[in-house]
Image (cartoon, rainbow, N blue to C red):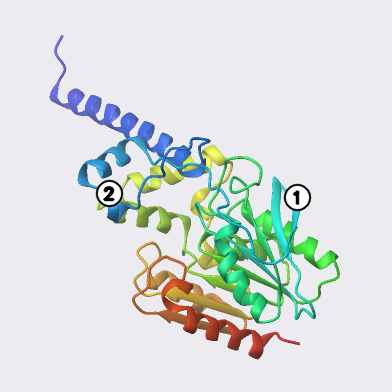
Amino acid sequence: MTLSIKQKYIKIFIISFLVINIIAFFHAYKFTHFSASTSEKTKTPNKLTTLEKAKTLFFGVNNPKPKNKRFPSQKFHTLQIKSNKRIECWLIKNQKSKGTVILFHGYGSEKSSMIDRSNEFIKLGFSTMLVDFMGSGNSEGNQTTIGYKEAEQVKTIFDCVKQSGENNVILFGTSMGAVSIMKCINEYKIKPNAIIIECPFGSMYQTVCARFKKMNAPTFPMAGILLFWGGIQNGFWGFSHNPTEYAKNISCPTLLLYGENDKSVSKKEINEIYKNLQGVKKLAIYPKTGHENYLIKNKVEWTKDVSDFLIDEITP
């Protein structure tokens, strides 16, 4: 018995839907779980060939667990702190310290990537705490939730520093680290003296869409399906992970930093976050700069912006 044209289209639709969901399921897992493999990490989309982009789109990225590549030049203490996962930190004490800056890294990175920023805060007279989020560096596991569950780790480290007797605590985060800080303040109501956040995305959906756009791939429907499966696999609803909304409950002094050529976070997202911040706030935008370490191209400007902010807003 032959199938009608309508039945054939329905069959094609069902098969296509299943294939899309299978691809999205594996992509979501690879995106949120680092591998123990020592093989090379998949290159950024702008450095991939057309064939490599196609392969990545079908089979996902190769994402080895980030490892700390170097150590601070100053004397430091290694701490193991229990949160929702076991977290490793480096504490660098500054004599006659003005306070403590806790530094949180971005996606696919680790605490050694924060050493350059830590050095600048130390020059400004602060002690620093550098943190490996879960799944990264020497912290437990291989999972990352792009700031969702990491928010609890921000709270744990913040409470630990406060309980040590520190009264002046500043939180610094870049990309995922910035998002983790924002979610932590929104959800756990912690009260840092100030926060410095670099290039936070506006929503989890927007950051997933940005990855597809960098691959010159259509965002619909795959971005939404990938986000759905990523949330299911990791125990949260990804569509509710929205730093733009978190900003409405942030009232501490905030310095927001952004590179105008950022392909991962749009200027519109940054403007919406900045608009929603409730307290004293400053926005600095660096020209000819993308989603990267701002010290590479803008060290003088970054140092001045951070120094002026700390002097104006929170230095005792």
76 on left or right of 15: right
Q: Is residue 38 visible?
A: yes
Q: Which residue is mark 2?
A: 48
The vertical placement of 60 against 239, above or below, is: above
Q: Compare marks 1 and 2 and give the one earlier in the sequence.
A: 2
Q: What is the x, y in percent for residue 250?
A: 63, 73
Q: What is the x, y in percent for residue 17?
A: 31, 33
* Quarter containing the N terminus: top left
Q: Name, please, the residue furthest toward the top.
A: 1
* Quarter containing the C terminus: bottom right
Task: Name the residue type under label 1.
Answer: Gln
Q: Quadrant of residue 70?
A: bottom right
Give the distance between the C-alpha atoms of the residues marked 1 and 2, in whole angstroms.
Answer: 38 Å
Task: Name the residue type under label 2.
Answer: Leu
112 on left or right of 208: right
Q: In percent of the image, x 34 and y 71: which residue is there?
A: 261
Q: Which residue is mark 1?
A: 80
Give the class, few, some or many, for how many residues have Cα within 10 Å of label 1's Cα (few <14, many ≥20): few
86 on left or right of 220: right
Secondary-structure class at tag 2: loop
Q: In percent of the image, x 79 and y 61: which residue is there?
A: 160
Q: Is residue 251 visible?
A: no
Q: What is the x, y in percent for residue 191?
A: 73, 72
Between 266 and 124, the residue placed more toward the observer is 124
Q: In percent of the image, x 16 and y 17: which residue is there?
A: 3
